[in-house]
Image (cartoon, coloured by chain):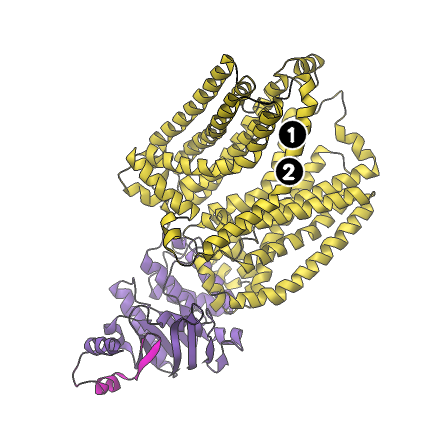
Chain colours: A purple, B yellow
Amino acid sequence: MIEICKVSKSYNKGKVKAVDEVSLTVHDGEIFGFLGPNGAGKTTLIKMITGILNADQGSIKINGRDIRGNPLEAKMQFGFVPDDPNIFSRLTGIEYLNFMADIYRVSSITRVQRIKELLERFEMSLAAADLIQSYSHGMKQKIIVIGALLHNPPVWILDEPMTGLDPRSSFDLKEMMREHADAGKTVFFSTHVLEVAEKLCDRLAIINKGRVIFCGSLQEIRAHAQANQSLENLFLELTENE
Amino acid sequence: MNSYWALLKILIINYFGISLFQIKNQKNRRPYLKKLGLFLIIIAAIAPTIALYAKLLIQGFDLLAPLGQEGAILTLGIVLVSSIVFVFGIFYVINFFYFAADAQSLLALPLSGYQVLGARFSVVLINEYLSALPFLLPPLLIYGIKSGASALYWLYAAVGFLLVPLLPLSLATIPTVLIMRFANLSRRKDLLKILGGLLVIALAVGYQLLFQKSGPNAMDPAFLQDLLTDRSGLMNLMSRVFPSTRYLGLALINADQLGGLVNLLQFAGLSLLAVALAWLTGEKLYFKGLVGSSETTAKRKMLSEADYRRLGKGLPPVLSYWAKEMRLLFRTPTYFINSVMTNLLVPILLTIPFFIQGRNQTTAMPWEKLLSAASGQTILMAAIIGIIVFMTGSNAITATSISREGREFFISKYIPLSYRKQILAKLLSAYLLGVSGAVLLVIAVRVLMPLDNSLIAMLLGVSMVAITPVIEAGLIIDLYNPKLNWENEQQAFKQNFNVVFSMLLAILLGGAIIYIVIRFIHTPVSAALFMLLGFGLAASLLYYFLMTWGVKRCQELAG
């Protein structure tokens, strides 16, 4: 569960408000999509949830642990997939996974089993011994997804996860997100691909210019607008009217 | 040639991070003022050293003038600058020609090898002029003013200044381009780049030594007599390292004669010939060395059961973080060459000349007498600890440890490992490399000199403690203002003021220790105790500071 309460963040000494008094609750067992045009504040909010950025005000709790007050315990609660998969290019895939397993204190037996299982699922078994710099964009994305799931986190946070994935991997990832939520855990992801949000999310929020302008289920969002309007039209309308 | 100029302009803007257009149009000039401020601080920091250098040159001039040998101060400056340009040149060329992020992208443009290499060569040359300025300007000015030189001298001096870096930089370029061409043939590119870099440096050292050895024995009386009676005797001796520098020296002292002009033309001819050779080598081999240098080979091999078993063992988080740091330091060529190798290079450079020259059987080495006295041992101890402090500061492992993470710094922010432990892991990497450098240096010194076991033990003990405050200070410098926004790894090092600050601090600290010990302490044991206490106290204070302010700073830094 993620509880975001009146969180704000501004840049340039308060001149630019990137996130403005955002409050959201993401429940266990649901996939929550976070939509918004480029520069709307999606990544800034995700960075604050994960502890990469400090919020100017407000509080963020992950499974009841405050990210500022109790950062280490809060960080143990989630697995994070950043939007840029170009990291640790001079480690091999398996070294990276082992590093993540060490950092998240995954036990010996579990780690071998999880790594094997996830490598096979993402068809990465053959590439694991190679340097990450030899991977394609999609492969890098996959190794990071695997690294984020090693400790079987109760909360899974993904920033634009589908970018660069081939159709098969994208399908697998969506399936895994569904399984994760069905197992009673939380999935929170940002995207600007409306189709993904439409097919995958139990609930979603739309953010524009740092403010959440809508939060609810797809049915609610449709009821909010004219009947039978496509999500795309609705999205354009909502974000343009702001 | 148009393409050359266009490329040069872009590279200069990119390399030095300045654009006149930007400066004129940007409202916020703070970043530029900050840069200017840092530049002024560095100038202020090196000013005392330059003043001392100038003082020595003036004294040298006065001492040598009665012998008619005052021109030697010119050769000293020219040779010094040539050596600096040569050694820096190797690092610049490896880094800027091959490891720069834009090196690959230029391959797709319709440019020929000599144009790209030429433009890069010119950027490095500008850098070298800046490095040459504080070393070459003082002797040129002092000789010119004190000898009441004519206008022609000043003209030759200006031309000479522009010419001096050309030959050593070309000499640094040619073997590098050659080796990199063949290093790229193989599959383990990063490793070979590192080995190639090592080989170039080894060749460079070998070349210098060969020239030193091929000359006459400096202790030969007949040679000494010639040295003192011939007007350019001292000049000839010094110019052995870079023989062509002799011509510029002669051109300057004979500026008013026709012979001076001939000498200047000879020097210019040799320098330009070297540049032509370097560019020609570039035309033939540069692209071949670059093509595919970013390719990485992948084995695509299934992990075995044994691999998985090894995996199962795992490490405590802080050690795992440390292992990651070490892997990246050793596997990234730029980091390896600038950090790890700096540590190993000093002991090696110090030992090789003595090995090659060999011991003179009939006369004792000068230090043997020195070492027999307690005060001599104290001086030696202070000097070695001073060098270790300097080595540790200049390898900049901690002074770039946050900067090296660059855009990946956000990972440190979201992983569940406390900043305290991350700081510890970073200190541990630098500490281990610092200790290995110190041990190597002590071994090197032991090979050269007959040291007591007790002295060796004290040296090792003190160096283990002396390294600590230096690496802690480096991390504080980097935490205060890390350079996280870079495009390629070499910017994390080459365009990072933290490296300079760390070096300056190490020079200051090393110098202060040597001065205090030599001036006030007379026995090795009391020197060891003094240093243990001093460095230990500094280490504890800085550790406390890192664990309080440093941790807070990590929290504040945005990923």
User: Residue B389, percent across and down?
Assistant: 66, 47
Residue B76 among magenta residues: no
| Magenta-drawn segment | A207-229
The residue marked by circle 1 belongs to what chain? B
**Badge 1 density bin: few <14, some 14–19, many ≥20, Cα 10 Å:** many
In the image, taking residue B285 as reference, residue B147 lies left or right, namely: right
Quadrant location of the N terminus of chain B in the rendered image = top left
Task: Report the residue at 62% width, 67% height from top.
Answer: B548
| Same subunit, tags 1 and 2 | yes
Q: Secondary structure at mark 2?
A: helix
Examine the image and state in which quarter residue B554 appears: bottom right
Residue at x 69%, y 24% (from the top left corner): B62
Please indicate, yes or no, whether residue B300 appears anywhere in the rendered image: no
Residue B369: name its quadrant: top right
- Tell me the chain of label 2: B
Which residue type carries mark 2? Ala
Horizontal and vertical percent position of residue B493: 50, 48
Element type where label 1 sits in the image = helix
Disc on res. B374: none
The amino acid type of the residue labelled 1 equals: Leu
Q: Decide: is A71 above or below B88.
A: below
| Residue B51, disc | 2
Residue A110: give x, y in percent of width and height.
Answer: 47, 70
Instruction: Determine if residue A17 is in view.
Output: yes
In the rendered view, would you say B549 is above or below A6?
A: above
